[in-house]
Image: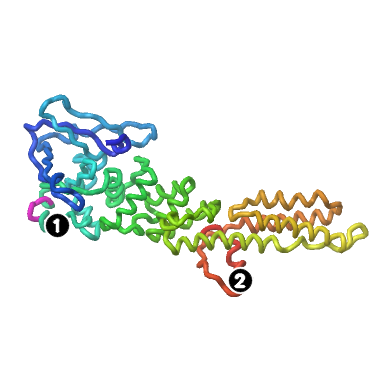
C-alpha cells in the first residue's frame, strides 16, 4: 500500500484465539477468488484501546499509521481500518452495522441507516436491506458480512465523508482523488449537484485547486453540470490559449460548457475592441492647439488601440492597457490634450476592470451593439 493511502487508515493486530470469522460478500468487479478470502476480527477486544493516536503530519492534517499489538506473534492477523470510520468512531449514537472493504483492503465501519439514507440505489446495489434485517444487523449492530467496493480507500473515504456530511479537508486529498470521488458519487447513488454545492466542504476543496489546475476543475464541473463550480473556475481560464485545445482535451469538457468557454474568450476580446474604439474627447480650440492638432492625438490613439486589439488576450491586465495608452502623452505638448488623454485612459481602465459575475447566456444576437454591450462586463461564464 502506498504512503498516501496510509493517511486514511490505522493498523490493528489481533490474536486468532479471540477472533471470529466474517464472511466476505463479493460486489461488482470482485473475483470469486477474492471473495473466498476469510477475514478474522476480534469479538471481545476493546476498540478504544486499539485506535491509533492521531499525530501531526507534514501537512498538519493527516493521521500517522501506528501498529498496535504484538505483530511478531505467529498467530497475529493485521488488518487496515479507516482512521475515521472505525469501531470506536461514535459518528452516530448507534453502533456501526455495515463493514465495507475497499479494493486495496481497507475496512470502513459505517451505518446502514446513514448510507441508505444518502444513497438512492442501495450504494450501487451492494446492500440488501431485506437480508440485513433478516440477519439482525440493523437492530443489533452485528457485523455479519463484509461488502467489497471496487473503489480505492482514498476514493471510498471521500464518498463516505460525503454520505455522512463530514469534512475530509484534514486528509488534504489530491485533485485527481477528488475528481475520481465525484465521478463515483452517481455510481453509489449520491447526486453531485447536491453534494458539490457551494455550501459543502467538497466544493471548497475542489475550488481551492482551481488557480493551479483550472482546466481540470472546469472539466469536472462540466461533466456533472456543476455550474456554481464552473463559473469561478472559468475566471482562471482567461489565460488559457484556445488553440491549445486538442481533440482529446476537448472530449473531457461537456459540449455546452466548452461553448461557454469559447464565447467567454471571444466576447472578452470583442468587448476590449469596443472599449478601445472611441478616441479621446477633443477640447475647445486654443491658439496653441486647434482641431487640426488634436486630430494627431486621435490618429495616435487609433494606432495604439489597433495594436492592443491585435495583440491582446482575454486576460490582458489594466496595467498593460494603461502603459500602452499613456505612452502617447510623451508626444503631446498641449496640457489640455494630456488632461483629455488621462481622462480617456481612466475611463477605459474603469470599464475594463469592472467585473460582473452574473451569468450571461452566450448566444449571438443580430445587433452588434447589444452583443458587445452584453459582454464587455463579463469575466466569468
Report if the CB atoms under discs 1 and 2 are less than 8 Å apart: no
Q: Position of residue 287 (x, y in %)?
A: 93, 59
Q: Which mark is residue 129?
A: 1
Q: Does the magenta stretch include residue 366?
A: no
In the rendered structure, which segment of residues is drawn in magenta?
133-137
Residue 257 visible in the picture: yes
* Front residue of 88 and 324: 324
**Figure label count:** 2
Q: Which residue lies furthest to the bottom in this view?
A: 366
Residue 367 vs residue 53: left or right? right
* Front residue of 365 and 170: 365
Residue 275 vs residue 228: left or right? right
For disc 1, the neighbor class at 10 Å (few under 14, some 14 to 19, many from 20) is some
Marked residue nearer the N-terminal end (1 or 2): 1
Q: Residue furthest right?
A: 287
Q: Where is residue 129 in the image (x, y as percent from the top left)?
A: 14, 57
Q: Name the residue under label 2.
A: 370
Name the residue located 79 percent from the left edge and 51 percent from the top edge: 329
Q: Residue furthest front?
A: 247
For the N terminus, which image quadrant?
top left
For disc 2, the neighbor class at 10 Å (few under 14, some 14 to 19, many from 20) is few
Q: Residue 8 carries which label?
A: none
**Majority SS type along the magenta span:** helix
Q: Nearer the viewer, mark 1 or mark 2?
A: 2
Circle 2: element type: helix
Circle 1: element type: helix
Amino acid at each position: 500500500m502506498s504512503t498516501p493511502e496510509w493517511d486514511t487508515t490505522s493498523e490493528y493486530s489481533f490474536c486468532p484465539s479471540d477472533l471470529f470469522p466474517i464472511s466476505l460478500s463479493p460486489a461488482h468487479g470482485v473475483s470469486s477468488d477474492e471473495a473466498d478470502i476469510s477475514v478474522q476480527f476480534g469479538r471481545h477486544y476493546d476498540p478504544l484501546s486499539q485506535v491509533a493516536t492521531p499525530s501531526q503530519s507534514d501537512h498538519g492534517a493527516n493521521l500517522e499509521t501506528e501498529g498496535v499489538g504484538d505483530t511478531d506473534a505467529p498467530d497475529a492477523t493485521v488488518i487496515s481500518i479507516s482512521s475515521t470510520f472505525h469501531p470506536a468512531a461514535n459518528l452516530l449514537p448507534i453502533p456501526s452495522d455495515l463493514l465495507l472493504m475497499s479494493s486495496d483492503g481497507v475496512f470502513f465501519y459505517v451505518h446502514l441507516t446513514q448510507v441508505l439514507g444518502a444513497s438512492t440505489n442501495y450504494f450501487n446495489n451492494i446492500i440488501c436491506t431485506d437480508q440485513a434485517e433478516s440477519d439482525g444487523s440493523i437492530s443489533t449492530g452485528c457485523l455479519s458480512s463484509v461488502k467489497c467496493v471496487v473503489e480505492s480507500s482514498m476514493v471510498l473515504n471521500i464518498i463516505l465523508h460525503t454520505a455522512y456530511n463530514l469534512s475530509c479537508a484534514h486528509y488534504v486529498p489530491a485533485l485527481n482523488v477528488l475528481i475520481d470521488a465525484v465521478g463515483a458519487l452517481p455510481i453509489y447513488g449520491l447526486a453531485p449537484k447536491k453534494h458539490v454545492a457551494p455550501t459543502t466542504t467538497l466544493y471548497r476543496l475542489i475550488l481551492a485547486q482551481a488557480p493551479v489546475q483550472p482546466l481540470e476543475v472546469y472539466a469536472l464541473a462540466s461533466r456533472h453540470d456543476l455550474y456554481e463550480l464552473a463559473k469561478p473556475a472559468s475566471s482562471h481560464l482567461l489565460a488559457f490559449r484556445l488553440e491549445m485545445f486538442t481533440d482529446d482535451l476537448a472530449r473531457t469538457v461537456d459540449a455546452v460548457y466548452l461553448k461557454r468557454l469559447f464565447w467567454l474568450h471571444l466576447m472578452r476580446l470583442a468587448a476590449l475592441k469596443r472599449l478601445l474604439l472611441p478616441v479621446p474627447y477633443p477640447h475647445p480650440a486654443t491658439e496653441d492647439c486647434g482641431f487640426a492638432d488634436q486630430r494627431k492625438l486621435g490618429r495616435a490613439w487609433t494606432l495604439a488601440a489597433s495594436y492592443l486589439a491585435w495583440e491582446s488576450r482575454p486576460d490582458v491586465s489594466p496595467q498593460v492597457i494603461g502603459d500602452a495608452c499613456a505612452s502617447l502623452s510623451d508626444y503631446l505638448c498641449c496640457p489640455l490634450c494630456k488632461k483629455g488623454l488621462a481622462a480617456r485612459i481612466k475611463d477605459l481602465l474603469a470599464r475594463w476592470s469592472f467585473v460582473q459575475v452574473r451569468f450571461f447566456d452566450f448566444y449571438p444576437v443580430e445587433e452588434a451593439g447589444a452583443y458587445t454591450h452584453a459582454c464587455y462586463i463579463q469575466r466569468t461564464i
